Image: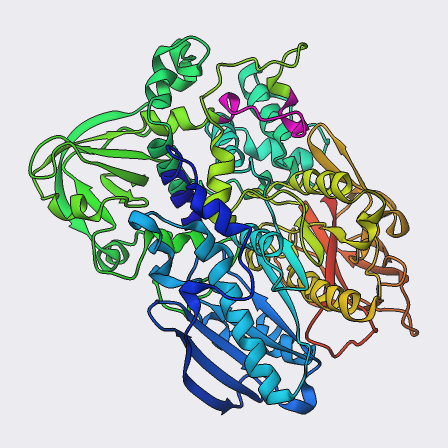
Amino acid sequence: MKHLVLGALLAATAIPPAYAELATSVGAEDALFKEPYVDIDEWRDTPVRHRYVHGGFKGTDMRFSFYMPPPEKFGGRFFQYVTPVPDNENLSQNAQKEDDNIGFAISSGAYFIETNGGGTSATAGPAFRVDPTIGAFRANAAAARYSRKLAQEMYGTPRVYGYIYGGSGGGYRTMGSIENTDVWDGAVPFVLGTPMATPNNFSVRMHAMRLLKNKFPQIVDAMDAGGSGDPYKGLNAEEAAALREATLLGFPPNSWFGYKTMGVHAFTAIYQGMVMADPSYFEDFWTKPGYLGANAPESLIKARLQFTTKLKLPLNAEAMEARGLTAGRLRGQPSDAGRGSADLAWQKLVNDGSTRPIAFELEGTPPDVGFMGGDLYVLSGEAKGSRIALQALNGNVATLGVIADLAALAKIKPGDEVRVDNSNFLAAQTYHRHQVPDASYTNYDQFRGADGKPLYPQRRMLLGPLFTAGAAGTVPSGKFNGRLILVQSGLDREAVPNQADWYQRKFNEIYGNEAGNKYRLWFTQNALHGYGEYKDVRTRVINYLPVLQQALRDVSAWVEQGTPPPTNSGYKVEDGQIILAATAKERGGIQPVVTVTANGKTRAVVQAGKPVQLTATVAVPPGTGKIVAAAWDFDDSGVFAEKAKLPATQSAAATISTTHSFEKAGTYFVTIKVESERNGDASSPYARIPNLARVRVVVR
């Protein structure tokens, strides 16, 4: 997300022409990365036997790590992971089991590449402008080229194939890489946003979160297994409109189950870019007709906070922890869980590992208005006139967001008068209404009248493409080199699912009858933005990393052997939502399709102590594997304690049954989780494709 914020810094002038030319002309060499060096070259045995090569490029802060298998295990290819935010070249060294990128690559006949995305080389452009192409694809391309030279020396292989993959901001960078260079033969972008995704996916979500905060329990219940299916029941007109607006733009209604913990996510970073890119909007919002704040409804007035007080004490991360407060951020060490992942990479922006203040204790306690973010305006002292982003209020403790001006932060002292103000943050929540793009973005039709013209005043520029170019180096066009498999998550709250449909339509428009030999689109049902997010909600969410692993193997077989991957996912778009086909054959892709019933229904009402017949049907899409594992969770605890009995002979379809009794009255959710593997290998730690299904049991 760092590059998304940096993209906003370019908003006033757009990407300089020199960068645009460079982005489409990067060839065999890059003048910035012309002198590679190696400072570590040694054999290691963890996680598996491999040659570790670490180095960089002279005159830059670019660093790389190559993990190269013994010659007898090399199949002539490499896999290269790109993080959403340029980060660290050693992130994969402590990963274990299915998260082990190094072990997976070597088991697939590949060596593995990771880099720091160019380091501070990303600021090497003319006049110290940020050059987004460096972190987007030039640095990674330079590492990939040099790796091929080492691989040819080590293995004697004249042709080394290369495949790049990344999610979220890394998905943008993957698209920038495969569109603007010929370095990689294939790509697997995942949880990918359109050029209009940022900030609009987040702003509409914030708007809904503000208005629906007291109605989420009933919305979640309606959308859960055995629920009514009507999330609008019991909402007033304003609440229903907010839910409908988010739904039409693409937010999955059945993903609101995470309302207690999902927070504002990367919006704390993106918001700062919005203020820098379009400062006049935040005044227009409260003063000009056509903007929500100019004729503010009561709910907006009550949510506004403008609280003047004085600073009492700066707090660093250690002081916050001592108070039992979480800053919701990573510590800045390469071994930290989540570093470089699609869901958590943005947190590096709000904790750079320093001991600087990350919060301030205030003398007064602001009133509780449901604060989700805002600003701290400094009204006196050496830093007078400064504005510092805030991401949270806990009583009289104000937690900082992304800091654009560290020099100003250093000048703030106890006793300075300040104002806690969320006016701009509230204004940002309906920014998407004033950013209506072209007609290819059908989810924006809700903001167009019958004549096709926008219903609301429009800003002078679209921020989405600028943010996107900050990450991808250029705005993705849909025209790419090599072959590509796009993997999108069905419950994604950040890169909402329908954005993949935009790419599919672009691919089909560009390639026509040849599209089937260029790309695949696979939706992963019951997956969130980050593949590690399943760990907190195991009975609702699956880990989609195995899908990425199989996609990498499939795209490499497509390129090298001409073996077409499994078909595109079958789906339709209704009211902004991706509706996957019901059967495995129609749905396609590679994920098993699972349904489950209790006494033959999606909602069973039974007496305490009476056995309930639980029946699951499982089917794997044709030619994509066999069922290798299944397990039951009877109490929604996330512990799949009972292994399901599978047929004696492995197959691509199965009916799995069991009985269970509930001794106490209450409402229970029973979940079955299944896994398939391409070759039916139940011992493989990789590419075990999961899915799950839930059923409601009401015990009286």
Residue 672, quarter of the rendered image: bottom right
Q: Is residue 293 above or below residue 348?
A: above
Q: In which quadrant of the rendered image does the C terminus lie? A: top right
Q: Residue at x 59, y 20 (%)?
A: 240
Residue at point 29%, 48% (across, down): 127
Residue at horizontal 50%, vertical 84%?
52
Q: Residue at x 58, y 29 (%)?
A: 246
Magenta-colored stretch includes residue 441: yes
Is residue 451 shown left or right of residue 16?
right
What is the x, y in percent for residue 89? Answer: 44, 70
Residue 394 in sight in this render: no
Q: Looking at the picture, does residue 123 appear above or below residue 150?
A: above
Residue 318 in view, yes or no = yes
Residue 443 magenta-highlighted = yes
Image vertical order of residue 138 relative to residue 363, above or below: below
Q: Is 188 on the left-hand or right-hand side of 470? A: right
Residue 114: % across, % down: 50, 70
Which sits in the foreground, 127 or 91?
A: 127
Q: On the picture, is 322 further left or further right than 156?
A: left
Number of numbered tags placed on the structure image: 0
Along the line of sight, the residue nearer the viewer: 370 or 189? 189
Residue 655 image point, x, y percent: 90, 59
Indicate the quadrant where residue 231 lies: top right
Instruction: Judge left or right: residue 431 versus residue 509.
Output: left
- The residue furthest right is 649
Choose top left, top right, bottom left or bottom right for residue 119.
Answer: bottom left
Residue bounds of the magenta highlight? 432-445
Where residue 181 sits: x, y (%)?
59, 58
Q: Residue 31 versus residue 352: which sits nearer the camera?
A: 31
